[in-house]
Image (tube, coloured by chain):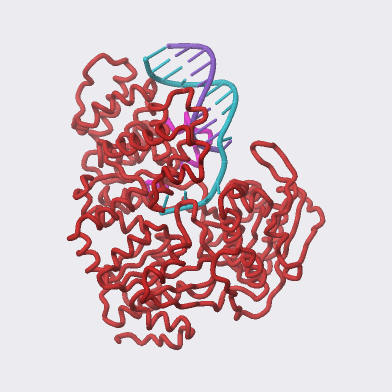
Chain colours: A red, B cyan, C purple
Amino acid sequence: MNTSIDYRKELNPEQYRVVSEGDGYCLVLAGAGSGKTRTLVYRVAYLLDQGVRADEILLVTFTIKASREMLSRVERLLGRPLDGIWGGTFHHICNRILRKFSPRLGVPQNYLIVDEEDARALFSQVIRDVVSQELRKSFPSPGFFSYLRGLALNTMRPWEDLLRERFSEYADHFFLIGHVFDEYNKRKREADVLDFDDLLVMAYRLLNEHSDVREYYSQKFRYVLVDEYQDTSRLQARLVEILASKHKNLLVVGDDAQSIYSFRGASVENILEFTDRHPSARVFFLNTNYRSTPEVLYLANSSIENNFRGYQKRLKAVQGGGELPIVARFSSVEEESAFIAQQIEFFLDEGVPPSQIAVLFRTTYHSAKLELALAHRGIDYVMRGGMRFFEQAHIKDVLAYLRVLYNPKDHMAWQRILCMYPGIGPQTAKRLYLILRDVDLSNLGELEGRWGTKVKSAWERIGYIFSAIQGLSAYEACKLILDSGYWDYLRENFEDYTSRQEDLIYLLEFLKGYRDLESLFSDIGLSESFKRPQKESSDAVVLSTVHQAKGLEWEVVFVMGVVDGQFPHSKSFREENGIEEERRLFYVALTRAKRHLLITAPTMSFDYRFGGYFARRSSFIEELPRDGYRELNPLPIDG
DNA sequence: ATACGATTTTTTTTT
DNA sequence: AAAATCGTAT
């Protein structure tokens, strides 16, 4: 022991047991607000105190942000910086492993990562090339392909089975669908790119097929800790098992009641099967809730009890009593939004800091009306979720140049670049790509062959850009690209070009932090939802999807748009166990609140298909115990 | 044949 | 509000 942390004093007995006895296979069932993060932080500190080296620890978290937060808390606790610990998401860790060993699988080290957006675009291209126009009408969408592939790989089941069981309407196209998958994989290979799921699958294959690599990592990681285990997929679970196979110190923390990512292959089964797979495993429970008032907890507990699957457990509150949660109904989304804005103003007047107030919703576009209402009252807010910074067209346009600089075979990036030039469309871009991918970019020379004047002038401009950016830093290169015509392109092609301009200026700032392109693309490729900081936003009200709110907490939480078809979402009705997952999502929303919880619902809601329609109040509200909340039918609000 | 603007359709949640 | 599709101009 070399620090003076009094673990026994700073933790409750349940937490202390996990921290001090967490060797071997351990499953920690940690309810919402039970100090799960705290426990993990102390566990890491404890291990280091015991003389475990930082680089022998692997900490898998759900987001990069969570990992950074945890590690900095460990540092604060120990009072010294720590170096060499592996922390991050599954995708990160796999990327890190692959950057070192990917050539073993025939993938060059300078592979690029394609995001969901790119993956869909690539599927779309493949479908256009492979499927006749006739068939395309009843053919699954690119998004569906990406979804099905991810699901199959993550659940480790053949996509054929999933299709047969759950999407039999596409059964006619069996053969063609397989063909599309093959072609998609082929094109990725040719362009040296990997999608998100490839990262996991490749790393898994690498560890399975190359015993020396497996030996190396499983030897290295004496302790493996996994957060948010309820949202890991089967593939991910197998992956950490391999990494922990040597020392057999695998501690996983999760809450089956908060499993909300089954759409991307996560399954509660991982939790339920853990003790079967590892008979020596010990199970710990953290059931004391430090976050919320008993009133909030009563409501949340009552809601989740309507689920049949999962451990039945009730969280115990230690906070003192507070106010009853409020359920309020409005005739329109506008009124609902106005009410929330008004209430926020009230809480702000009471002295609640803006950053302690959050509004949660099921889907991103439900926040549009609310944003107007907040702007109307001059309330600062930050948006989480929605369009991600690096997925926006203008950001991708500019970064495409850097991508091909790093890896000239990146087909999609070339496509992007080329189609920006007038006179070049998909076809010409394709032909030019075949030339460009194996030519010296720093010295393009004349374009051989019969090409139009427009194409030739585009060729010259591209040639100029690539000769000029040789040897420049990412920042300087990007600046040059912007100045050689992109600003004009932006103005001509986007209505809202001023806000996009700000994004690009922010991008420049961001790039200053990077020396080499490899680390840049590893970071960008995996950067989860991340938005350009809005104004001096660190102290602003938070708007967020429920998914993005996972693991966070606020004094005041609004849950808006709680209407049948929105929350629970109508798409969930046809999914098996869909409603239960939606209910867990609702449970996550409710348990974010420390003191004040306000659930709101409009009676009239809009849908892009029907225009307007009357919405029934969500069954999630109907099933709440009547003594658990105060019903509010507010008078119409002016303005 | 191709590019590009106009029109129609489509949207859950995310690494 | 963004993407897929369609129809017309080059």
Give, as a single range, the part of the protein colored magenta: A487-509
At horizontal 31% and vertical 35% (from top left) the residue drawn is A187
Examine the structure image and report whether residue A137 is included in the region drawn in magenta: no
Residue A616 makes an appearance in the image: yes
User: Left or right: A108 with respect to A529?
Assistant: left
Q: Main secondary structure of the magenta part?
A: helix
Q: In the displayed image of the protein, which residue is found farthest to the right?
A: A635
Residue nearest the viewer, comparing A96 with A440? A96
Q: Quadrant of the N terminus of chain A?
A: bottom left
> Could you tell me if residue A505 is visible in this image?
no
- Where residue A505 sits in the image (x, y, percent)? 41, 45
Reply above or below: A222 against A334: below
Identify the residue shown where x is 30% and y is 42%: A193
The residue lying at 28 percent from left, 33 percent from top is A465
Please tell me which residue is depicted at 59% across the width and 62% down the height of the picture.
A589
A503 within the magenta span: yes
